[in-house]
Each structure stands twice: as C-alpha cells, then as structure tokens.
C-alpha cells in the first residue's frame, strides 16, 4: 500500500486535495512552491522591465518543472535508490563529454545541445551526487567509517572539480555542499568536521592559485567593491543602494528606481533579490525568507519521517542544499558573500535551475508519499 | 535495508539523524538571522544613507564612451568616420500624457503612423527612465521646427549621437567592414567594464580585426542625479581615451579604378606593393553599402542581400576560392627549372593534346590544332597546355606540391583580416587522408595547368605573384600601415622575412616569358601592352567552371552564363623593377586576356603614373 499513514496530515475534503494526493503530491510543500512561483512572476514582471515575453518563457519552464516534479513524486524512492549509482555515473560521463566538447570548441561549455533543447549535465549532477553518496553510505552501518568517508569524499570531489573546470564556481559549490550535507546527516563525527574545515581553511591559498583571473577579480571585488566601480564592483554597490533605499516598507511593486535605471543584465537573474528588496522593503524580505524557511522546515520534517537510511540522507541533503542556494544568493546580493553565479532559487529568471530544484522537491514528495505501513 | 542491522542499530541511527536534523535546523536559523541582521542594517540603519544615494541625489557611475578611431587610406582619405546624427527622444516617465504628446509631435513633424507604432513597441521593451528614439537622423528642418516649441514638450529632447559613416559605401565594404549593435553573444564575450556604454562593435573587416585599437579606453564619471535621472553635478571623472586612428596601405582611388573596371562582372582584384607587402587594392565586387548595418539594417533588406544570387556580402578577395587555371604556369615553369626537370631551351611538341603512356585519354590543349614545337618561353607566352602536362608529368605531384607551398599556396596569406581560407594545394597525403584514395597520374597533369583539386584565393594569388616579382622574398600582405594612438604610434602587423633560395637566372627566364605574354605579338594579353613606356609581366588564366566531355567543343556563346569560365590574370610592373603586383579574378568572364588583363592594366597604369609624379 502506498497511502498516507499519519493522521496529523491535514486533509482538505476538496477534490483538488484528492487529486493531489493521488498524484503523490505533498500538499503543504506544493502550496509553498506554488506561492513562491507566483511571487516569482510578480517580481520578474518588474525586474524584466514589464516584458511579457520574459514571463511567458519563464511560465513555460515552470510548467515543465512542475510536470517533472509530479512525475518524480510518482516514482517509488526505492527506484531512485536502485538507480543512484547508474544515474551518477551517467552524470559524470556527460560532464566529461561536455568538458571535452568544450575543449574542442575552444571555450567554456556547459551545454550539450540536443537539438530541441540544451541540456546542462551539471544540473543533473546536483541531484545525483547526494543520491550517490546517500546510496553508498546507506549500504553500511552509520556513522560512516574512515574508509567510507574517504570514498565518499572522492565521489564528491570528482563532479565538483569537473564543474569548477567548466568554469562554474556557483554550481560546483552547490554540488560539493549537497554531498557534504549527506555526510553530515550520516553522522560524520564532529572531530572530522573540525579537521576538514581547518584543512579547507589551510587550502585557501592553494585554491587562490588555481582560480581563473575573473574568479580572483570577484573575490577581490567582494573585499573592496569600490576599487572597480565600472566593472565587477558595480553590481555590489548598486545592489546595496537598491536594497538600502527600499527601507522598511519598500517602494512598492514596479516602484524600483535603482535596478531600473541601470543596465544591469543580472537584474532579473542573479541579482533579482535586489529588485525585490527595493520594491517590498524589509517586510517583504522577511516574508520571502519565511516562505523559504517554511519550505526548508517541511523538507527537514519529511527527512525525519523517512523510513530508511537512504531516503533520510537524501531528503536531508536536498533540504539543506536548498538552503545553501538561498543563503549564497542573498548573501551575495546583500554583500556578505563574494559574487558567485548562483540564482535565487525558484525566483530568478532562467530555466535550468528551476527544473532541477523542482525535480528535487519531486523526490522529496516521493519519499513522503510512498511510506509503507510496516517499515521494511 | 541490509540484514546485518539490528533493531538497536536502527534506533541509534534514528536518534543520530534526529540530532543532526536539529543541529542543521539551528544552523539554518542562525545563518538566516545573519541575513536578517544584514538586511536590517541596510534597510533600517543604512536606509537614510542609501535612500539619499538612490533618491534625491543618487550618485551614478556613468561610462564615458571613447570616440572610435578613424580609418584612413594611404593618402589620408577618410574611409570610416564618426558623424553627428540627431534623434528625437522621449522619456515616457517624464511625460504626463504620452498619447497626447505623440499626437502633437505627429502633427508637428508629419511623423508616419508606422514610426509611432515602432516607437511604442520599442518603448515597452526598454527599461524605465531610458530615452527611446522616435525619429532618427533628423533633418535640419525637423530640428528647427521642434526647437521652437520645445518648452511645450517636457520629456522630449533632441539628442546627438556619433554614428559611424563609411563615405565610400560599397567600394571597400569588405575590407573596411562595419560596426553594428552589440548582440547578446558579443555582450558575453566583450570585457564588461570596457564596453559599458558602448553600443557598437566591429563586425567584419578592419573594423573587427582592429576592434581593440579602434574602440579606445572607456572612462567614467560619477554623476549626481535626481530621481528623474536628470544629471545635477559631476563629482569625479576619468576621461576616456579615444580609439587609435588607422592608416591603411589601401589606395582608395586605385580601389575605385579596380572596382569600376570589374564593371558588371562579379570578381575580385588584389594589388600588393611588392617591396613591402602593403595591400593597395582589395576589391570584391559586388560590394554592399555598410552604412545601414550601423543603424541596424532592416530585416527584409538583409534578407535580400543574403538571398542575392551574386552574394554581395561575400568577400571574394579574401574568401573566394577558384582554380588558378593557367596563372599557375609561371610557378610550375619555375619549379621545372629549379628542379632541373627542364632547361630553358627544352622543347615539347604540341599536337593539341597530350597522352599518358598506355592511356587512351586525350588531355586537351585549349588550342585545337596545337602550338607545334614550343620552348618554355613560348609555352608561357601562348599558354600551351601540352607543354605543362609534360612538365607536370616530369616533376610529379610531390615536387610541385612542395614548390608551390613556398609561394603560399594552400596556406593563409597572413593578411590582417579575419576569416581567410587556406584554399587547397593537393598532395598525395591530402588525397589519402581526405578522399581515402591514391593519387592518379592524370591528376598531376591537370594540377600542372591549374585545374583539378587546386583552389586558390585572390589574396593568395596576389601574394604569390608579388613573391615572384620580389625574386623569392616571400611577401606577407597587410592592410594597416600605421596605428596612431593618443600617446603613441606604432606600425601595423609584424611581417616575417623569408627568402627562397632561387636561381636568379631561372627567375629572369620566367619573368621575360611573362613580359612576352603582354608585349609579344603572340602573347595572350598583348592588348594591354600597347601605349605604355614600361613593361608589364603577366599571365592569363581561364578556370573551368564545369567539365566538357572528351569530344565536345566549348563554345562561349552557347552556354549558360553561370557555367562560363572564370577569367584570371596575374601581373607585376615594371618588369625590371617591380613595384606593384596585381591579381584579377573575373567570375564567368570568359578569357583572362580579354577581360581580366585590362583591369590589371588600368590599376598598374594609374599606380605607376601617380608614383612617377612624385
């Protein structure tokens, strides 16, 4: 049987509710995601200079993403578990393929052109990496032993480096943290966590050495945005002015002046939070953060309720990575983190990230709605 | 679940997981609080500060766009310049009743409805507070009419722009190129800071190759602006440095002569200054007017150019590939002498065809009855095919390949223009790799008269001719002679010296044969040798566009124009002290001697006469 077992689940007697349950849709999560998508259109309309084309294209992507979510929610999580390693292997293969094609084309390449649409393997690996690590660790008793830790680390580092080489620092960061989150939820001992963090801190100068000039520029700009006002520092200065001038109540929808006056190509993608903060003010920001927290809390709850180790670890990681997404983007826009190309999840313009994110939520819903009456 | 798990293990695991979830949740709450603290700091504590920056007197950093460098020809004639253009622009946010304003403007300036529709469309795509043009390229009359009533039109203003203008229109469009609006792909690849504020970028030709020099360095100004985006005060500025002026080796008058001489034909003329490699003429006909591309060419006009059968957008001089036909013969002849396959007196009997031993196929001469017994000089003068079949057979493809390669066939000439093609200099190896076939002896023969696989571009042919005129000192063609920046001047691209070890006597033999082509009574280009007080060395060529069957007769008047032969001519002058080398290709021109040679003759004449005056 694959029906709900918990009675605390609120069950509206509506037809829609019944349909959603039949579809294995988690209603609270669905409502939050739906609300935030609506909000996304509202902001995009303003940030995209009231261009209906932008909205229509985004609507098509969001529709596709919701469809994918529904399909994935329908699949039993045991199937995800079974195919974790294969999917991960496929992802790595595609990443290597993209890298080689990119080298032939003599330029950065992140896409595989499939004719009717362009596929970005780094998006797929965002989900398959935590799946792989969760599958691998769930095969053994928890907490993981040093040998398993080592293998898991290698499994995380491979896709991370492949993506960093593209170069796509933002995505690499997200993949690494999704893998690390699995390790954390698997009960990685605090001593290890301390050891790894201090090693990473020590490795920073080496990392600097391997960074591309433009990546270094970004870090330098973060440390001193005023040094290059026309180039990289421009975004941070402008976004701080936009957010700050929004004040408590904001300037109202379509009322932003800062983001509108500039030719900021990122105003509807990575820097969309600045537009939002300017128009809706501190209250709006708190509301948005609350909505995000609601989603994350629900996801963590799903993780807690999950019945087997694999589902738990995967759900926990997906929930945490979603938070990392939010934190890195907002942190960058408000000037507390360096600029890495991470969009504001579910709100920024652009198709690939929204599809992956909703695919992740589809897996979470699948975990929650396929629980067995008697645990295995 | 693995069966090694006990119930106890599961409990421990669950508790561990619960612990971790709680820790993660606390971490998430703490980090979110961090974000909130920062937001409070920006939006409450710093609000007044940022609001001042943003609202009343916001300081905007505005790029100061450098003026683009000007392109001159060798005599200082302007080939690409920046001219002023006036446009009527509106900022909708500063206008209280836009529809009314548009109606009044329409009545005042007789603006057609379609322009208003166009404006409305563009306005909706535009960011707010950005002015959008209603009328471009305003006439003096329109400007005067508006100037009188300007106070009654708040939010409407006449703006001045510099736009690129090409005063020679289609004459040198391929070589100078044009600038156009920066597109999305270019936006990503161009340096962000340098192009903030720039709207145009070089797309093709010199404008593209020398983009970095021509563009200049962007400056910036910190400008105080009010909420309507009106500038109040400039605080701080770093001035832009204008783009470099380029002085080309091109002679635009000579270019015009060449272009006009091509008349109704499609084709290309390339002339090179022999001693330096400076390109004097780089003409490709038909050309196109580059000016519409600057303001954004209308879609149907662009489609028409694209679809046009004679491909005006195609740079024939740079990218056109043609069989060289008989113009290859002086080089093959020189190869024969250099490799001692023949000596200058070597004679071949020409019955009008050539046969390989034990093969029945007749390799035909262009002259049906044949040329009789001819030596090398006569063979070049009369362009005897049989002589060169025989010579090619003696040389073999390997030696022909390596000799022709030294003259730059089959490789890019290195001219400072992007998009050059290598052409094709066939070899055994090439055929094995590309066609998976062995090399056949018959292919050696037709390569010897410049047919078959051999493909050359006009610039390659001109370069090889200049190298021959330069007695084996390899010429690298270039277009930019001098780059004049605000603070420094530098010469154009570096050229490398390479000298072929050729026997001067052999070169003299070939050159005198080429002089005969123009000045001998039986020369194939004797028509241009009359009435000049210097000698031209030349060689005609006719390149087959299609193959005629063994027994068929080629009759120019009977066949479709598109299948008629290409006419070619290479030349340099004066023969004893070469100053200019010219290659001419006339598509479907028929005979090299009657169509292509006179074009070269005109170019040479004008160039030498102008130089003698000095």
Image: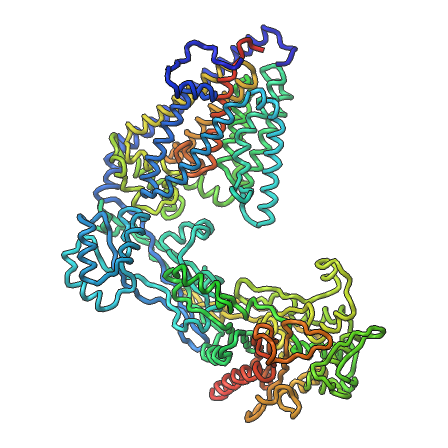
Q: Is residue B396 left or right of residue A315?
A: right
Compare residues B438 and B227 and report the one nearer the observer. B438
Query: Is B391 positioned to the left or the right of B583 in the image?
Result: right
Rendered image coloring scheme? rainbow
Image coordinates of residue B173 in percent, x first then y, are 45, 69
Is residue B453 shown above or below B123? below
Q: Please tell me in which quadrant of the rendered image residue A325 appears.
A: top left
Q: Residue furthest right?
A: B358
The location of residue A144, given as percent across then percent down, is: 60, 18
Residue B554 lies, with reference to residue A234, above or below; the image says below
Quarter of the view holding residue B69: bottom left
- The N terminus of chain B - image quarter: top right
Give residue B468's position: percent from left, percent from top.
64, 78
Residue at the image position 55 percent from the left and 92 percent from the top: B532
How many numbered discs? 0
Q: Quadrant of residue B583?
A: bottom right
Q: Nearer the viewer, residue A305 or A197?
A: A305
Residue at the farthest top position: B8
Please determine whether, in this image, residue A321 is positioned above or below residue B9: below
- Residue B346 visible, this orientation: no
Residue B525's x, y, as percent? Answer: 61, 86
**Would you say residue B4 is visible in this rendering?**
yes
């Amino acid at each position: 049987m694959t029906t709900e077992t918990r009675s605390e689940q609120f069950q509206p007697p509506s037809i829609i509710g019944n349909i959603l349950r039949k579809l294995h849709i988690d209603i609270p999560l669905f409502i939050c995601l739906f609300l935030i998508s609506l909000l996304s259109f509202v902001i995009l309309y303003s940030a995209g200079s009231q261009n209906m084309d932008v909205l229509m294209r985004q609507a098509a992507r969001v529709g596709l993403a919701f469809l994918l979510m529904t399909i994935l929610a329908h699949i039993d999580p045991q199937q995800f578990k079974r195919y974790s390693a294969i999917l991960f292997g496929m992802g790595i293969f595609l990443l290597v393929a993209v890298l080689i094609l990119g080298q032939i084309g003599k330029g950065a390449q992140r896409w595989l052109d499939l004719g009717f649409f362009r596929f970005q393997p780094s998006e797929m690996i965002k989900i398959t990496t935590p799946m792989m690590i969760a599958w691998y660790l769930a095969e053994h008793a928890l907490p993981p032993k040093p040998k398993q830790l080592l293998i898991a680390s290698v499994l995380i580092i491979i896709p991370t480096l492949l993506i960093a080489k593209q170069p796509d620092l933002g995505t690499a960061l997200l993949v690494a943290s999704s893998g690390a989150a699995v390790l954390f939820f698997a009960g990685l001992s605090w001593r290890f966590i301390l050891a790894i963090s201090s090693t990473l801190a020590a490795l920073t100068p080496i990392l600097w050495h391997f960074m591309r000039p433009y990546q270094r520029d970004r870090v330098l700009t973060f440390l001193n945005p005023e040094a290059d006002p026309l180039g990289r520092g421009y975004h941070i200065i402008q976004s701080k002015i936009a957010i700050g001038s929004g004040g408590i109540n904001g300037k109202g929808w379509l009322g932003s002046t800062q983001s509108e006056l500039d030719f900021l190509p990122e105003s509807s993608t990575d820097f969309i939070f600045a537009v939002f903060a300017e128009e809706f003010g501190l209250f709006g920001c708190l509301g948005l953060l609350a909505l995000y927290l609601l989603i994350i809390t629900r996801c963590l709850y799903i993780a807690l309720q999950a019945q087997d180790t694999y589902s738990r670890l995967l759900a926990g990681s997906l929930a945490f990575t979603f938070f990392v997404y939010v934190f890195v983007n907002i942190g960058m826009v408000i000037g507390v983190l360096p600029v890495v190309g991470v969009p504001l999840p579910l709100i920024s313009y652009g198709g690939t990230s929204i599809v992956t994110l909703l695919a992740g939520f589809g897996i979470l819903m699948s975990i929650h709605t396929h629980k067995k009456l008697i645990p295995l | 679940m693995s069966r090694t798990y006990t119930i106890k293990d599961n409990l421990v695991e669950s508790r561990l997981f619960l612990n971790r979830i709680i820790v993660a949740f606390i971490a998430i709450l703490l980090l979110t609080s961090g974000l909130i603290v920062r937001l409070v700091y920006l939006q409450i504590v710093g609000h007044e500060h940022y609001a001042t920056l943003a609202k009343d007197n916001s300081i905007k950093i505005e790029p100061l766009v450098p003026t683009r460098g000007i392109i001159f020809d060798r005599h200082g004639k302007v080939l690409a310049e920046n001219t002023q253009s006036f446009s009527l622009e509106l900022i909708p946010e500063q206008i209280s009743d836009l529809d009314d304003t548009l109606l009044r403007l329409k009545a005042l300036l007789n603006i057609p409805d379609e322009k208003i529709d166009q404006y409305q469309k563009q306005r909706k795509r535009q960011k707010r507070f950005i002015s959008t043009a209603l009328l471009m390229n305003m006439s003096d009359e329109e400007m005067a009419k508006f100037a009188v009533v300007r106070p009654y039109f708040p939010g409407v203003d006449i703006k001045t722009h510099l736009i690129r203008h090409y005063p020679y229109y289609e004459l040198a469009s391929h070589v100078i190129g044009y600038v156009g609006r920066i597109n999305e792909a270019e936006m990503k690849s161009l340096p962000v800071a340098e192009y903030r504020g720039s709207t145009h970028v070089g797309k093709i030709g010199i404008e593209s190759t020398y983009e970095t020099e021509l563009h200049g360095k962007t400056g910036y100004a910190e400008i105080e602006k009010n909420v309507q985006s009106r500038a109040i005060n400039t605080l701080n500025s770093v001035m832009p440095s204008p783009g470099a002026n380029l002085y080309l080796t091109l002679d635009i008058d000579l270019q015009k002569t060449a272009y006009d001489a091509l008349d109704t034909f499609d084709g290309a003329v390339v002339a090179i200054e022999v001693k330096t490699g400076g390109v004097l003429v780089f003409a490709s006909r038909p050309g196109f007017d580059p000016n519409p591309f600057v303001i954004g060419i209308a879609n149907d006009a662009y489609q028409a150019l694209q679809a046009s059968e004679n491909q005006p957008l195609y740079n024939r001089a740079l990218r056109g590939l043609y069989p060289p036909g008989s113009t290859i013969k002086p080089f093959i002849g020189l190869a024969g002498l250099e490799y001692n396959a023949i000596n200058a007196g070597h004679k071949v009997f020409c019955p009008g065809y050539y046969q390989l031993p034990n093969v029945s196929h007749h390799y035909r001469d262009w002259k049906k009855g044949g040329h009789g017994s001819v030596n090398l000089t006569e063979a070049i003068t009369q362009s005897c095919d049989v002589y060169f079949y025989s010579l090619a057979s003696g040389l073999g493809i390997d030696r022909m390949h390596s000799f022709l390669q030294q003259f730059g066939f089959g490789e890019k000439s290195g001219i400072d223009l992007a998009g050059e093609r290598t052409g094709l200099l066939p070899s055994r190896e090439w055929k094995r790799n590309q066609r998976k076939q062995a090399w056949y002896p018959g292919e050696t023969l037709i390569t010897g008269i410049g047919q078959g696989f051999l493909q050359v571009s006009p610039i390659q042919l001109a370069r090889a001719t200049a190298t021959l005129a330069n007695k084996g000192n390899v010429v690298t063609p270039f277009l930019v002679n001098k780059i004049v920046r605000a603070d420094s001047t530098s010469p154009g691209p570096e050229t490398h010296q390479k000298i072929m070890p050729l026997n001067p006597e052999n070169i003299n033999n070939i050159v005198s044969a080429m002089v005969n082509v123009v000045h001998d009574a039986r020369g194939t280009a004797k028509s241009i040798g009359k009435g000049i007080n210097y000698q031209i060395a030349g060689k005609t060529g006719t390149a087959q566009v299609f193959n005629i069957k063994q027994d068929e007769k080629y009759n120019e008047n009977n066949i479709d124009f598109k299948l008629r032969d290409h006419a070619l001519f290479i030349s340099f002058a004066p023969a004893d002290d070469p100053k200019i080398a010219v290659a001419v290709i006339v598509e479907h021109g028929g005979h090299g001697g009657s169509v292509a040679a006179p074009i070269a003759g005109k170019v040479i004449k004008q160039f030498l006469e102008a130089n003698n005056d000095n």
